[in-house]
């Protein structure tokens, strides 16, 4: 199972990848980064994307799981199964790039996500989303 550095290098192998980082959305700190960052500042990018992640996961409307009248049944815990975050990923589209934020699921309360900055002309958004999800599932923290 790969750690942060190996996972980030794996993300950079995606066609069109400009940069990647693993970020703690509570502190806003980058736990690891590779490649470029929008604006050239990895820490500023980590703090800004952490704010987006925090808003998405703490938003009542965005964090709904679809359970309720007519939705899938709840499990015994009354919420999503396991320690899955209420939001799986975020995709932000700019004129020349995509930003993918994929939340990492762990056996403990994870506050980590992977951020991939992808060139819009060279990258494949659908493939990048699939590969980022696979990478986040294999990521070993600690």
Image (cartoon, grey):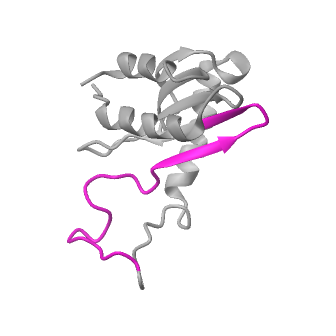
x%, y% of residue 79?
32, 67
**What is the magenta segment's predominant secondary structure?**
loop
Image quadrant of residue 104? top left
Who's the residue at 69% across and 31% down the image? 120
Q: Identify the magenta region.
A: 71-99
x%, y% of residue 129?
50, 40
x%, y% of residue 3?
31, 21
Q: Is residue 76 magenta?
A: yes
Determine if residue 112 is in view: no
Query: From this viewpoint, which residue is outermost toward the right?
Result: 95
x%, y% of residue 20?
53, 23
- The image shows a total of numbered marks equal to 0
Who's the residue at 64% across and 20% down the image? 37
- Against 28, residue 8 (above or below) is above
Q: Is residue 74 magenta?
A: yes
Who's the residue at 53% across and 32% down the image? 115
Determine if residue 42 is in view: yes
Query: From this viewpoint, which residue is outermost toward the left?
Result: 76
46 relative to 39 in the view: left or right: left
Q: Nearer the viewer, residue 88 or 61?
A: 88
């Amino acid at each position: 199972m790969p750690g942060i550095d190996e996972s980030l290098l794996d993300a950079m192998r995606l066609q069109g990848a400009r940069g990647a980082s693993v970020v703690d959305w509570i502190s806003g700190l980058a736990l690891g980064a590779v490649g470029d960052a929008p604006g050239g500042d990895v820490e500023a990018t980590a703090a800004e994307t952490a704010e987006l992640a925090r808003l998405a996961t703490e938003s009542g409307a965005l964090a709904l799981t679809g359970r309720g009248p007519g939705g899938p049944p709840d499990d015994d815990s009354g919420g999503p199964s396991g320690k899955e975050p209420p939001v799986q990923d975020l995709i932000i589209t700019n004129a020349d790039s995509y930003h993918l934020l994929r939340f990492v699921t762990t056996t403990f309360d994870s506050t980590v996500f992977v951020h991939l900055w992808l060139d819009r002309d060279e990258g494949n958004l659908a493939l990048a989303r699939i590969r980022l999800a696979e990478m986040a599932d294999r990521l070993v923290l600690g």
